[in-house]
């Protein structure tokens, strides 16, 4: 089973600038062979996700080489504060894929405005489609991230 890193970025925004040099803040999650792996979602369930062979329970924030627990259980909890994590990393994220559970819900316009001010392209999808979109963006080599809430059911 691969390595998994847990940490908190609660106050990281105070110490990190979007214009900081790439070496200012780094995060690498290494695979079992000691080399960086591209994050790939192989499955999802009502309990969580399997990512690079690692089972993760609950919601997740995914980056090219990182898996972070995201303490969001419902789309109504998504707001600028819960998305702050996604503009802290270097290189900057181009596209943020939000997987909001079983079905797409209308998101507050303030959320879209916040994403625009931070330079994040925002894709809001149901979780199954968000998983596929994130994998596709990773395969293309894009600077993308995903915030995924497990679906409440697996029936469509």
Image (cartoon, grey):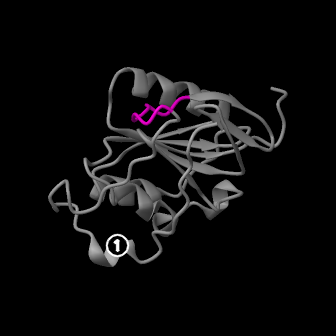
Residue 134 as seen in the image, left or right of residue 102: left
Q: Nearer the viewer, residue 61 or 67?
A: 67
Residue at 66 percent of width and 51 percent of height: 59
| SS assignment at label 1 | helix
In the figure, 75 relative to 65: above or below?
below
Q: Position of residue 61 (x, y in %)?
A: 53, 50
**Disc 1 crowd, CA 10 A, few/some/many (<14, 14-19, 20+):** few
Q: Which residues are magenta?
A: 33-40
Left or right, 27 with respect to 49, comes to: left
| For residue 123, side relative to residue 116 (left or right) | right
How far from the left and from the top, in percent, is residue 115? 37, 54
Picture quarter with the C terminus? top right
Q: Residue at x 28, y 76 (%)?
A: 15
Q: Position of residue 148 (x, y in %)?
A: 61, 45
Mark 1 = which residue? Answer: 13
Position of residue 63 relative to residue 15, above or below, is above
Residue 36 is drawn in which quadrant? top left
- In the orientation shown, which residue stands out farthest toward the front? 33
Q: Is residue 14 above or below residue 47?
A: below
Q: Is residue 93 left or right of residue 56?
A: left
Which residue shows up at 51% across the image and 69% down it?
8
């Amino acid at each position: 089973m691969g390595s998994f890193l847990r940490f908190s970025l609660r106050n990281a925004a105070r110490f990190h600038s979007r214009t900081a040099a790439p070496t200012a803040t780094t995060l690498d999650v290494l695979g079992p062979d000691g080399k960086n792996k591209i994050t790939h979602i192989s499955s999802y369930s009502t309990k969580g996700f399997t990512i690079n062979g690692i089972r993760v329970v609950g919601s997740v924030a995914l980056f090219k080489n990182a898996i972070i627990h995201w303490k969001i259980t419902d789309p109504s909890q998504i707001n600028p504060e819960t998305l702050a994590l996604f503009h802290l990393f270097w290189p900057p994220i181009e596209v943020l894929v939000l997987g909001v559970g079983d079905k797409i819900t209308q998101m507050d316009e303030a959320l879209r405005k916040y994403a625009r001010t931070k330079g994040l392209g925002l894709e809001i999808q149901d979780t199954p489609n968000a998983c596929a979109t994130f994998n596709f963006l990773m395969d293309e080599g894009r600077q993308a991230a995903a915030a995924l809430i497990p679906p409440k059911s697996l029936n469509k």
